[in-house]
Structures are given as C-alpha cells and as structure tokens.
Image: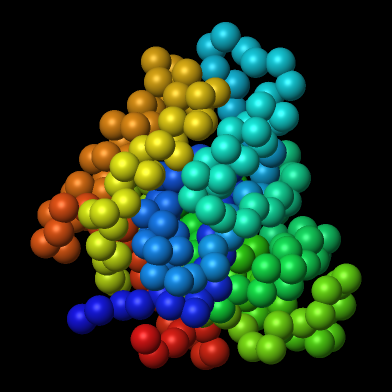
Amino acid sequence: MKLSFDHERVLAVVAHPDDAELLCAGTLARARAEGAVIGVCVLTKGDKGQPNRPIQNLPAVRRKEMQAAAKLLGAELFFGNFSDGELTDAAATRRRVIELFRQFRPTLVLAHDVSDYHPDHRAASALAEAATWFAASRGHRTASAPLAEPPALWFMDTINMSGFAPGFYVDISAHTELKEQMLACHRSQLARADDANFSPLLDLMRLQFRARGVQAGVAAAEAFRIHDTFKRARAW
C-alpha cells in the first residue's frame, strides 16, 4: 500500500512548540517531499516550560525556536498565542482556531489524541476536532471565508506511546535526520533534560519513532489513527 500526499494541504495543530517535532514532523517532511503544502499551528506560547535555570522572556525565545524549526521543514507557521495551562475548548478559543484553519485551508489536519498525557494536548485535540467541522460552516463567521468542506482529521500518537492503539503508520525512515535537526532548535526545552519533572526529548523521540518502525516493519515510523466520523474520514 502506498499513501501519497501529493496536492494535499497538511496542517499539524499542536499545543506547544516542539510537539510537532516529537509526533509528526517526519510525516510533514514526507508530505512536503511528495508535493504537499504543509503548516504547523502552535496554540500556546510555551511560556511556562522553564528549565531549572529560568530564561527571561521565554515566550519570545520559544517563538524563535519554533520559527527556526519551521524554516528547516519548509512549513507555514501559525500561532494561537494562548498561555500554557490555560488552553480550553471555549467559544472564543474555537473562533481563533477556526480562523487559523481558514487562513491555511487544510485538506488534512494532524491533531493530538484526546487521551494524551498533557491537559493542553487534550484541549488542543478537542479544539482541532471542533474546528475541522466548524471551519466549513458559513454560520461561524470569522475574518476569512469558510472552507469548501471539512478537512480529514488524523489523531497523532501520544507522547511515549501510552494508551494509543495505532490505526496505521507512516514510514518516515528518510526523514528522521530532519526531525532531529528540528528538535535541536528547541534549546530551551532540551535544557530541561535533567529536570525530574521532564524527559530527555531526543532520547524519547528516537525511542518512539524506532519502536513504531519496528511495529510497521520499517526503520522509523509515526503512528496515527483516523477520526472515523461523518465527513472527517477519507478514502486515500
């Protein structure tokens, strides 16, 4: 079976800077290589992810880190500008995400799984799911025009693969070096490797894409499952 991303517009909707690197950057890189337009929508500022030695003006630092990573990927970048720990599936937040969807106009959205460990990830999942539907609704008015139809939605693997049953795998064997280069841009978070409340991100990411690769019979893979509801599932 061969999946092609040619002519697609693929948007990853993530809670924090560095989430896309960990969970879907290989798929985005493959999609771009196959002819897709790709984007990353980061909903929070990453303003509370401080290392043991605090960084002044952390939101600005993390924004620059995300911009550097997106440049390596060749992705359009969108920011929700919400604060860490304050992301909720509320009316005003939905309007913001709907407008970002309408600016990029995706045919496929990659979103956090609703069962992921972080409350911001779960909130981002709910927001992305709602926006895939309402971005195509003429009754939900924002500055940009509604989408012609709801985009397809794939839920990404969870961090550390906890509690996630993959529906399918994307072979990213040719794109792991880029994933690692992108993650290296996030120096503020790599500096938290010795924090007992955090994890060494590079080790975590490598373990995950190699384990999913073993399961899929390739060197490296990212796992997803489709959102199998009316008008959000597609034949490929």
Q: Which residue is drawn at 23% across and 54% down?
A: 173
Q: Quadrant of the C terminus?
A: bottom left
State the image quarter where residue 182 is shown: top left
State the image quarter where residue 213 is shown: bottom left
Q: Which of 81 and 35 is in front in this view?
A: 35
Left or right: where 124 falls relative to 32: right
Work out whether 170 lies above or below 137.
above
Q: Which of 14 and 180 is in front in this view?
A: 180
Q: Which residue is drawn at 47% across and 18% down?
A: 191
State the image quarter where residue 171 is shown: bottom left
x and y percentages locating residue 116 in the rendered image:
44, 52
Q: Which color mode does the image show?
A: rainbow
x and y percentages locating residue 220 in the rendered image:
22, 53
Q: How many marks?
A: 0
x and y percentages locating residue 12 in the rendered image:
54, 60
Q: In which quarter of the image is the N terminus?
A: bottom left
Q: Which residue is drawn at 73% across and 51% down?
A: 80
